Structure formats: C-alpha cells, structure tokens
Image (cartoon, helix red, strand yellow):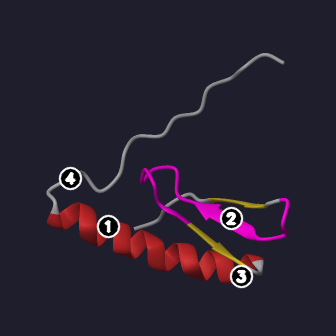
Amino acid sequence: MKFTITIFRDEDGVYIAECPSIPGCVSQGKTEDEAMANIRDAISECLAVRSELGMPLSVDTREIEVPV
C-alpha cells in the first residue's frame, strides 16, 4: 500500500514524520532518511494493530482550499 506522509523539521532540528490517513501514526529521526525509515515501520505497526482490533486501516483525507 502507498501512503502520503508529511515530514518537517522541528525547533530542535529533529525530523517529524506523520501519516495523515492513519490517526496517531507519527515517528521521528535525526535525519530525513531516518525519519522516513521510522515512519515506514510505524505505518506497518499501526496497520497491524488496527487490523487486530478490527478497525479500518486508514481514514479518508481530503484537500480543501482556504483563502488567505
């Protein structure tokens, strides 16, 4: 399965990676590559837990336009 992730660097220089379509699925790393590897593991673990609990594997995500 393919998932969209977000990745950003926080005020401490740590890279934070999140998977918006899986609530609570977040990881981090000292480098962007480490954060991406860690979010892959986190997604796998989140999917396994959600499956065991009979929960949907992901939620819908949508884009909206907000005037600025």
Name which residue lies at 59% across and 59% down: 5
Q: Which residue matches tag 3?
A: 33
Q: What is the C-alpha distance between the residues marked 1 and 4?
A: 9 Å
Image quarter (top left, top right, bottom left or bottom right) of the N terminus: bottom left
Q: Is residue 15 magenta?
A: yes
Check disc 1 and report the residue beneath it. Answer: 47
Q: Residue furthest top?
A: 67
Q: Nearer the viewer, mark 1 or mark 2?
A: 2
User: Label 1, label 2: how many angstroms apart (C-alpha)?
Assistant: 19 Å
Check disc 2 and report the residue beneath it. 16
Badge 4 amino acid: Met
Marks 4 and 2: CB-CB under 8 Å?
A: no
Q: Is residue 33 left or right of residue 38?
A: right
Marks 4 and 3, how far apart at CA: 30 Å
Left or right relative to 42: residue 28:
right
Which numbered disc flags the more N-terminal residue, 1 or 4?
1
Q: Quadrant of residue 32?
A: bottom right
Mark 4, residue position: 55
Hey, what amino acid is under mark 2?
A: Ile
- Give the residue type that dot 1 points to: Leu
Residues rendered magenta in the picture: 11-26
